[in-house]
Image (spheres, helix red, strand yellow):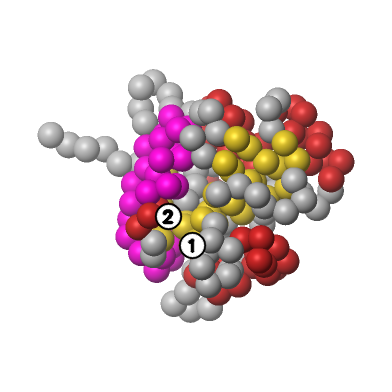
Amino acid sequence: MSSISIIGLGNMARALAGRALAGGNAVEIIGRDPAKAKELAATLGGATVGAAPAGDIVILAAPYAGAAAVVREYGDALRGKVIVDITNPVAPDLQGFVVPDGSSGAQEIAKAAPDDAHVVKAFNTVFSHVLAAGPAEDRPLDVFIAGDDAQAKARVSAFVESLGLRPWDTGELSMARALENVGLLELGLMNHSVKHTNFSLGITLLG
């Protein structure tokens, strides 16, 4: 199993930490408010609280607006680590993104990371409560990943499987643009047709 550091104290951090612990992973919670980090760790049971990322896999479960700053802040502590970006850099009007044309949130975060760290996009297409609930009615819950380093993606895939979920490698980190568009698509579905977030998008293998 993996050693996981989760930076963030929101719903996705809670959902990921809960599933990670249930899957036998070691989980460390990191947040700007130490008291809230301790409270979250205590409610989860089995998680620890850290000041700087010590896990082999570091999950950025903070809003995109501050994600690159968080990566720069921890700097050397992230050397050699796998950094999982779960953010969706969606504009406030939900009509586009707040990243430069031709780029993605994951690629912008990678620019802020140490040269020997490996950024992998994952979990941005799964709503937090769906993730917390896990697979339903024998249907797998799919997690799409993208990254430039094959070994880093393999480690993230193994972590995804430990959560009882199904990983799908979509290619290099440039594919994060497509995955973030899927996140935007889900928000469009939520607002215009489905009208709630109790759904997930995934792969159905035919034949």
Question: Is label 2 in a helix, a strand or a loop?
Answer: helix
Figure quadrant of the C terminus: top left
Q: Residue 185 location in percent, x, y?
A: 45, 54
Magenta-colored stretch includes residue 165 = yes
Is 197 drawn above or below residue 135 in the view shown? below
Magenta-colored stretch includes residue 148 = no
* Residue position for label 1: 118
Amino acid bearing label 2: Ala
Q: Are marks 2 and 1 in contact (CB under 8 Å)?
A: yes
* Residue position for label 2: 152
Q: Report the residue at 59% width, 30% height from top.
A: 21
Q: Residue 31 location in percent, x, y?
A: 76, 49
User: What is the residue that sits farthest to the right in this orientation?
Assistant: 35
Residue 123 horizontal side relative to residue 13, left or right: left
Residue 192 horizontal side relative to residue 78, left or right: left
In-front residue for pair 105/48: 48
The range drawn in magenta is: 154-182
